[in-house]
Image (cartoon, rainbow, N blue to C red):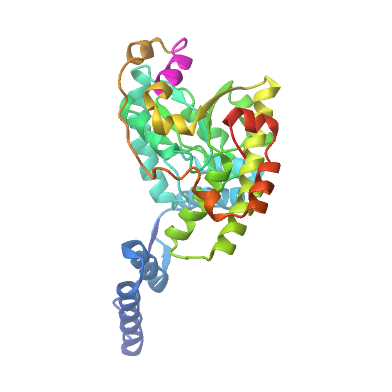
Amino acid sequence: MLELAFDSGVADPDVAVRERARLEGALAAALAAEGGAAAGVAALLAAIGLRPGLMNESYFAEALAFHLAQTYAHLGRSMEMVDCIERSGTLPADGGDLLYPDHVARSLGLFEHREAARARGVPAFLIASMPRAASTSLTQSLARSLDMPVLRVSLGHFPHCMLAPSWLNSASPGGAVLHDHFGATPENLATLRSCGVSEVFVLVRDPRAAAASVVDFGTSRFDQPIDDAQWTANVFDTYRHFFIPWLEGWIAAANTGHLRVRWIQSRLVRTDLQLVWRDMLSALAPLYPSLNSKLDLKPAELRVNFVHGLDDRWRCRVGERVREGMWAALSPAAIELLELEP
């Protein structure tokens, strides 16, 4: 376990003075940090530093394997990621690049919640979501309505999120909803097959609007405003390199017939969650009969990271040439699936 690198109780007066000055500087940095409490915590940790605590070697072996898996995933090295995540012995948690002790603590609580839901006959809702497509609203609403946890079984960053087989095997028997952004890559499709998964819900949105929302979210989150020209360039690059390959990958996977893809339209999550609820539960009810009694229930509707009326705002900021380029990048299948207009 990591601990703050305090150097207190030093007998040498000169060292003690330097340590006091170091901690005073750390306090000043934390209190002066702009960006709220999170920025203050980051500044304090950076100034004081972290070091391994007094734990046994097996603990650190698992912690190292876990953090190596995270790093391999961000580097796109799937074989090493799979090996390390298995050696870490971890269960799935609810996402984020957490430190090992935080991940373990969260995963254990979520495991108990998941097992209780599974005992009631609640299935696993395996959802691959396009970012900024109301995925948090959908998964949180399902989780609240069926009293089950939200889990993530992939590592890395969109659009290169990699499924961890041991986590997927842990979650797929039931009792949880997945909030993941994994794509239909050869590695992920192979993992789904090897784990016995034959059906996946895929949440999609107009990728042009989603790309614009991702850029907006990033600039607001990190408080880094950019001018219109840079914003347009960022949106187009994000759209072309991230969203189009992700969307086309799932369309191709749906057409192979090896995996049943059940599409969920983001606009329906935002305008008719009752219909989405009924469609999803109906799809799983043949194997989970307990869901039949819940088809007509009104789901709890949680609006998280949810903004109204932005589907067409991107059109006002990008020029005609960029709009034409974005349209040209869409396949006929994507246009038909999402009922898009230029």
Q: Nearer the viewer, residue 86 or 287?
A: 287
Q: Nearer the viewer, residue 101 or 324?
A: 324
* 63 to 299, vertically: above or below: below
Q: Residue at x 45, y 21 (%)?
A: 280
Residue 83 location, x and y as percent? 61, 41
Name the dominant secondary structure of the magenta segment.
helix
Q: Residue at x 33, y 84 (%)?
A: 21
Residue 43: image quadrant is bottom left
Residue 195: image quadrant is top right
Q: Is residue 131 visible?
A: yes
Image: magenta residue range = 277-287
Quarter of the image with the N terminus in it = bottom left
Q: Residue furthest bottom?
A: 14
Residue 110 location, x and y as percent? 36, 35
Residue 109 location, x and y as percent? 33, 37
Q: Residue at x 39, y 45 (%)?
A: 305
Q: Nearer the viewer, residue 191 or 242?
A: 242
Quarter of the image with the C terminus in it = top right
Residue 166 location, x and y as percent? 54, 34
Q: How many marks?
A: 0
Q: Nearer the viewer, residue 177 or 169?
A: 177
Does the stretch in magenta take in 137?
no
* 341 to 278, vertically: above or below: below
Q: Is residue 190 visible?
A: no
